Image (tube, rainbow, N blue to C red):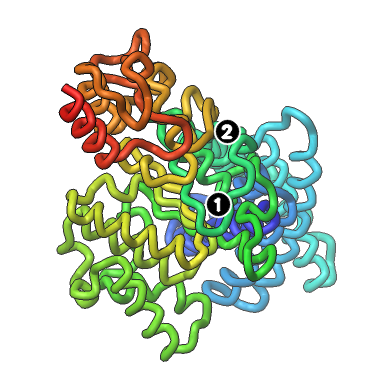
Amino acid sequence: MRAAGPNIERLARVSLLSAVALVLSYLETMIPLPVALPGVKLGLANVAVAVALFSLDTRSAAAVAAVKVFASGLLFGSPMMLAYSFGGTALAFMGMAAMSAVPGMGLVPVSMVAAILHNAGQLAVAALVLGTPSVFVNLPVLAVAACVTGGITGAVGEAALASLEGAGGEKGRPVVDCAPLGSIAPGELVVFVGANGSGKTSCALQLAGLAAGGGVGDGAVAGAPDGPAAGRRVGVSFQDPDSQIVAPVVRDDVAFGPENRGTPRERMVQVVNEALVEAGILELSGRDVDSLSGGQKQRVAVAGLLALAPGLVVFDEATAMLDPRAREGFARMVGRLREGGVAVVQITQIMDEALAADRVAVFAGGRIVRVGAPGEVLRDAALLAECGLEQPSVYRLAGAVAGVGAEVGGAGAAEAAPAAGAPAGATEAAPAGAPLSIDDLEEAICRWYAEA
């Protein structure tokens, strides 16, 4: 999984930065400068190259620089301008790469030197074309202008990097040790519970290869039927559905993934319909996304995920906006996914949803503090209370039942008493292994009533 995730993330970032470089190149053609000397320019597109160099690696930055040169030259310039830009960019990039390797070197001085070298490279191309080195007489003036413009673009680049890190980029998001989870088997449901900011989403993103520091390694889906590649195909349904809906119409949004994979049209129509049916929103297929409720949007996002047929699905609080009936439908959908061999990681604040899990992982303080069967983890009222969580309702109800002396699930009244320091009504009235159920409570009440 680590082999595929970072490559996908790097490709996405390079693509976005390349697009930013093209936009900035176009904007620069529309900004007049008060200097009449040829060669003086702001160099706004270099901000994208610098950000790639400092946030990714030299190879990624070189890709952004190449796209900037050739695409902007073909779209906004001429063959001669393309030659000048290539010469300047090549020399500037070599200087940037060399300086950025110096420990503690800031982006501003790197950008200033790159601007000077860019002008020098352009003059070198001009000298070759004109057959005279006399053009270098303009280098001192251009160097002074380059220090100013390079300093400006460097400052903008540093602000962009700070913004990326502060928004939870790879450097800003804490790394969570996911190793305690071990392998996630096909068809297994692992539920993440914990207070806000406890590390649940960070761990899930690492599992999906969308953040650094994944702890389960390659083959996170143990025994995947189609080999290692299937184990690396991970789908994530984010907490905010608007962050992953890209098309204005429901059907088009669900088709976005398969279409970009090159799925044949007939097969794509079938896949989209199956995903819409699975998510329970076939009747919404022609609706405008903006006209949907939050819960409906959440199900659209889930359908788009299912259309890609991942081997491991991460649902980040996918039921937060759903009503009770829709949550029941979601649970049935998860059950069908598991029957089809799809592993599921579900992040939730609704503790009752953890009862259906094969394993429950409790997060606190940016780490996993407990992993185990729901009957073992959810009966530990003291642990859950310490992590800011309450037991599922069936466990709290078991506390009331045990309070009148009934034995719940074969456990005695003393074992069923609330743990010290736990909230009122909390109980440890469950045997290890399988979680408590309403049937267990009904049986305990009937037995107690018959013996009374």
User: For the residue carrying disc 1, how many other residues have a C-alpha within 10 Å: few (<14), some (14-19), or many (20+)?
Assistant: many
Identify the residue shown where x is 18% and y is 50%: 323
Q: Nearer the viewer, residue 438 or 144?
A: 438
Identify the residue shown where x is 47% and y is 25%: 364
Residue corresponding to mark 2: 176
Quarter of the image where the C terminus is located: top left
Amino acid at circle 2: Val
Q: Quadrant of residue 436?
A: top left
Q: Position of residue 100 (x, y in %)?
A: 74, 40
Q: Is residue 399 something one can see in this rendering? A: yes
> Looking at the image, is mark 2 or mark 1 earlier in the sequence?
2
Identify the residue shown where x is 47% and y is 70%: 308
Q: Nearer the viewer, residue 271 or 430?
A: 430
Q: Position of residue 149 (x, y in %)?
A: 58, 44
Q: Position of residue 432 (x, y in %)?
A: 47, 31
Amino acid at circle 1: Ala
Identify the residue shown where x is 29% and y is 37%: 440
* Element class at badge 2: loop
Residue 415 position (above or below residue 21):
above
* Element class at badge 1: loop
Q: Quadrant of residue 11?
A: bottom right
Residue 246 position (above or below residue 402):
below
Residue corresponding to mark 1: 208
**Does the residue at mark 2 contact the one at mark 1 (Cβ under 8 Å)?**
no
Q: Quadrant of residue 158?
A: top right
Q: Is residue 24 something one can see in this rendering? A: no
Residue 90 position (above or below residue 191):
below
Q: Nearer the viewer, residue 236 or 360?
A: 360
Quarter of the image where the N terminus is located: bottom right
Numbered marks: total: 2
Rounded to the nearest angstrom, the CA distance separating label 2 from label 1 is 13 Å
